[in-house]
Image (tube, helix red, strand yellow):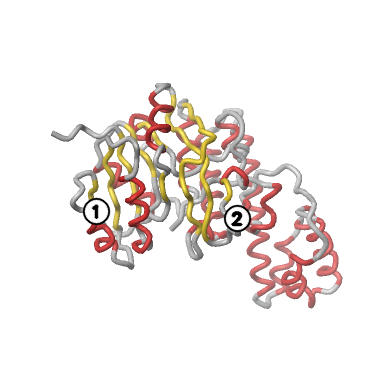
Amino acid sequence: MRRAPRVSIIVPAYGVAHLLGDALASLQGQHRQDWEAIVVDDGAPDDVAAAFARFADDPRFRLLRTDNQGVSTARNRAIAASTAPFVALLDGDDLYDPTYLDRMLAAIEADAALAFVGCDAICFGAGERAPRRYSAIYSMAGPVSLERVLNREMNIFVAAIIRREALDAIGGFDGGLVASEDLDLWIRLLAAGWGGAVLAEPLVRYRRRPGSLSSSARRLLVGSCLAYRKASAALEGRAEQATADRMLAACAQMLRWMDGEALILGGDVAAGLPLLAGAERRSRRWRIAMSVMRRAPRLAAFLLRIRPWLPGPSRSPGGGVPPETTGRTDRGALTAPSPIKR
């Protein structure tokens, strides 16, 4: 008789049928074998069932087919169909290191106050000249606290392991968020009084893909704004509310800047230029570009196109705004939540 699983692994597979086999094979290669995996096909445009077929004989795998309501709902439905006391997250195009379950379960089982444990990852694929650590892009050093997660001083990579008791207590993922639902989850767990931890080892291979949600800067920024708006309301009267409000204001400003750039590049300089108010504080490149654009608006679109080749950027003061919203080259000064690919 098969042992009851200690951990349920949730694998959303929308749009990644051609990569799903690598993810599932990485589960079969785990040193620890007391797991179950729920693969979710939530109306994917590709053939997830065909990709899953070669794993169907392994009783630890189940395929859950449902309508499309977004990645949060897909995960929530899979979690509801699972049975183990711990839940681990794996995107259908990423891979676990063979020691992932060993290390992550040991860490979360050692402290009953922990709602989740994250880890570092190796980024590879689109936009990566060579594999590099997630922590080389996003800050992961130091303790996990509500204040530091809100402020993006601590970033939790999405392939974390979560205590079911804690997840159930806060109602799972918020199906109303189009992005940054992982950031929202960590905030709500920490705000509820649970703890979190991060292992320094890179226990996941994180595949970057063109067209994934993590490459859609505006959707991520909108999701971050919604997450911070929720956090501000939930933290009313608490010291951390000020951080949520400040981050919401920063995200809203970045959204205005992004929309201003889009309008200018689309030919509507008169509507776009006012939205760039304050952009000169972002870097030396922006100071040069904004100074010229105000004097010669007809050059605005041209300047936005050549801005990456203007004299190099200075570090942005304060930090804390998602780097996806500022472009890949600005990441050195800023931090962001782990993106969910969709």
Q: Position of residue 310 (x, y in %)?
A: 80, 65
Q: Nearer the viewer, mark 1 or mark 2?
A: 1
Q: Quadrant of residue 236?
A: top right
- Label 1, secondary structure: give it: helix
Q: Report the amino acid beneath label 1.
A: Phe
In the picture as drawn, the residue positioned furthest to the left comes out as 1
Quarter holding the N terminus? top left
Q: CA distance from mark 1 to mark 2?
A: 35 Å
Left or right of 13? Residue 336 is right
The answer to which of marks 1 and 2 sits earlier in the sequence is 1
Mark sitting on residue 55: 1
Q: Quadrant of residue 200?
A: top right
Residue occupying image coordinates x 56% and y 40%: 155
Q: Which residue is mark 2?
A: 324
Tell which of 240 and 102 is nearer to you: 102
Tell which of 99 and 109 is nearer to you: 99
